[in-house]
Amino acid sequence: MLFAAMIFCLPVFADEGMWLPLLLQQNQEDMQRSGLRLTAEDIYSINQSSLKDAIVQFGGGCTGEVVSPQGLLLTNHHCGFDYIQSHSSVEHDYLTLGFWAQSMQEELPCPGLEVRFLKEMRDVTEAVLEGLSDDMPEAARQDSVKARSGRLREEFAGANIDVRVLPFYYGNQYYMFVYEVFKDVRLVGAPPSNIGKFGGDTDNWMWPRHTGDFSVFRIYADSNNMPAPYSPGNKPYEPKKYLKIDLRGYEEGDFTFVFGYPGRTQEYLSSFGVEQVLKVEDPMRVAARTARLEVIKAAMEKDPATRIQYAAKAASIANGWKKWMGEIKGIERINVPGSKRDYEKVFQDWAGSVSGAPYSGVLPALKSAYQEMEPYLTEAVIFQEHTIAPEIVPFAYSFQRLCQASKEQDKLEETLARCRAAAEKFYKDYNPEVDRALFETMMALVPAQDRMSDAEIKKMAASFYEKSLFASPQKMMTFLDKYKAADYKTIEKDPVYAYADRVYGEYSKSVYPMLMQCRKTIDSLQRLYMKGQLALKESGAFAPLLAGGQKKLVLSNVGSSRFYPDANFTLRVTYGKVQGFTPADAVRYRHYTTLDGIMQKENPDIYDYVVEAKLKELYAKKDYGRYANALGEMPVAFIGTNHTTGGNSGSPVLNGDGNLIGINFDRNWEGTMSDIRYDPEMCRNIMLDIRYCLFIIDKFAGASRLVEEMDIIE
Ligand code: ARG
Ligand code: GLU
């Protein structure tokens, strides 16, 4: 009993939290107690090379890691997807068949793709906030912050250097990030989609999972090993650090940490904020997407060409849809609004006791700010999920630049060429009939106050899809081929263009600016609320909330002894352990999956579950080489209690020695509410086992030249 109580009193941070590597010293003891055999300095240092030097921001929303002395990079298949697709054609269908460069000469340049190494991060709170007070007018405060951040950026600027100054804890602190940007990044390899996307949207956000979600790139640099634009003469980049790969696997309970770029979390919202997500935003988006996906899926099932055209679009619509459904369920299951309200009562009482009562008004003010925002939020969601769901609407609107260039006679040729290219790309994956069904369905489902009558919708659909230039690929391409400046009048008279121009105009005039204004107000209130929460924690007055049976009711992050800043796509360490979970009564999920599970899911008639002949052959012969686990199985994926979110895709999963054992790629459905509230019992991150990744590269694809570059521990 006493013993149990003592354990309870130890400050345990593990599981929840996304920690700034710069401050990792504060977690070192806890991490070491949990199984880390490194120091904080081994993970993040600006004086010597450290693990951080092997981590990159990959493109605009993922993470990647360097795994060889020649700049070889691993990330997820879904992170490399666009680049794999852009190199694909009917003759070279790399998406379907996979791609493996046989030599460095065959590695494919990816225009537009950038990776960034963090050179340094610094606390610049003083420089940014000095002399600014909480009661000064918000606009003046923001102006100062902007000017001071700008000066810092100038001071640290340099060739191929990108400097960012970002708010933490809603602007109570500021950090500066100095990145080195590499622009010559080439595609080296990708498994076929039925490995890289195995299980597709059906298995997305779910455990047990069997997706080989990885792709391989390489960073190139100039002859001085410096960043340079693409040039055939560039050389593989020699990194300051690359990760070693450990094939010895893990046991349940083993320590792991994930080092990468989580995108966005909102752990410190008020009950009003959570209620709005739960009751307004998520349900509206889910309902709209359910209808939208039904239309698209029905069309995809009817026709194989449509299936290809709409596959990627359906995947991205479904990704958010499924996540929000899980989020609603999770928030309800652990009653987040209720526990936030309990916490807010304590906060409010305490606020009254603070001298000058600076925090007493913040919760009531937040409440009314959310009320004020709600109508704009609703309008914005209608616009995003209904109005512009028929693709013809945003597409037509993109012709505004052509009208403008025509009227101004400025850069007309260039704009026309861009529009023509955009039109080709758009029509390749566009079916006017499907889009018409989308228009009719999504308009009919607009919430009452804004809905048109059925007759109006029908009439509009007829004029759009039977008369508009935009609904006819042939007419549009001919029109563009013969385009002269005066033809902008034809565009402006087009029914779809006129409609798009009107709805975008209304949105950008009477919805978006108001919504932004409300968000700004909420953000500045959150800043004060956050400051209050930090002060409350310091005061210890929240302790009664943690006592006994109430503990579960309380914000879990209030229970930990240190707050962590919400994710904002900056480099973080999150750590936990390999662990299964219990999603429902009597159901226990094991912590890893194997190739046996792929064979159990196999179904040649269902696109998501087709298994490659070569993979079946390796399975039949149990030809796993050195990649099998101790039981002789081929492990595929595993789960743990690392607190991750979107953006952590592609992040390295490291063991206690800092060696690579997996690649993060998803979370479990039962735990997607962790962006708002982390529940250690139910939240798991999903990781690709590095042994499956190497097995596919080596045994399946025969790309052993890549494995030879790596430093492998067996
Ligand atoms: N759920 C993962 C993430 O949020 C994977 C998404 C890509 N896969 C898919 N089937 N849509 O990014
Ligand atoms: N698939 C997500 C990503 O692309 C990671 C899953 C999550 O949201 O945790 O970043």
Image (cartoon, rainbow, N blue to C red):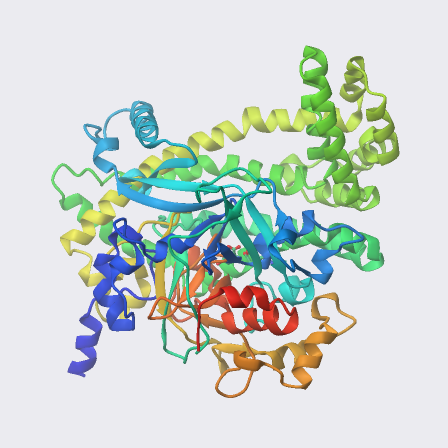
Q: Which quadrant of the structure image shows residue 318?
A: bottom right
Whether residue 77 sits left or right of residue 442 in the image: it is left
How far across and how far down the image is residue 165, in percent?
34, 36
Give the camera-side residue of 532 and 411.
Answer: 411
How far across and how far down the image is residue 481, in percent?
84, 25
Give the camera-side residue of 395 and 107.
Answer: 107
Q: Which quadrant of the structure image shows residue 448?
A: top right
The residue that appears at 42% across and 66% down in the rendered structure is: 244
How far across and how far down the image is residue 223, in percent?
48, 42
Eyeballing the image, is 687 above or below 141?
below
How far across and how far down the image is residue 464, in percent?
81, 32
Q: Is residue 568 visible?
A: no
Q: Is residue 24 visible?
A: yes
Q: How many marks?
A: 0
Give the camera-side residue of 313 and 281.
Answer: 313
Give the camera-side residue of 183 and 668.
Answer: 183
Q: Quadrant of the C terminus?
A: bottom left
The residue that appears at 33% across and 71% down in the rendered structure is: 656
The residue that appears at 51% across and 57% down in the rendered structure is: 72
Q: Quadrant of the N terminus?
A: bottom left
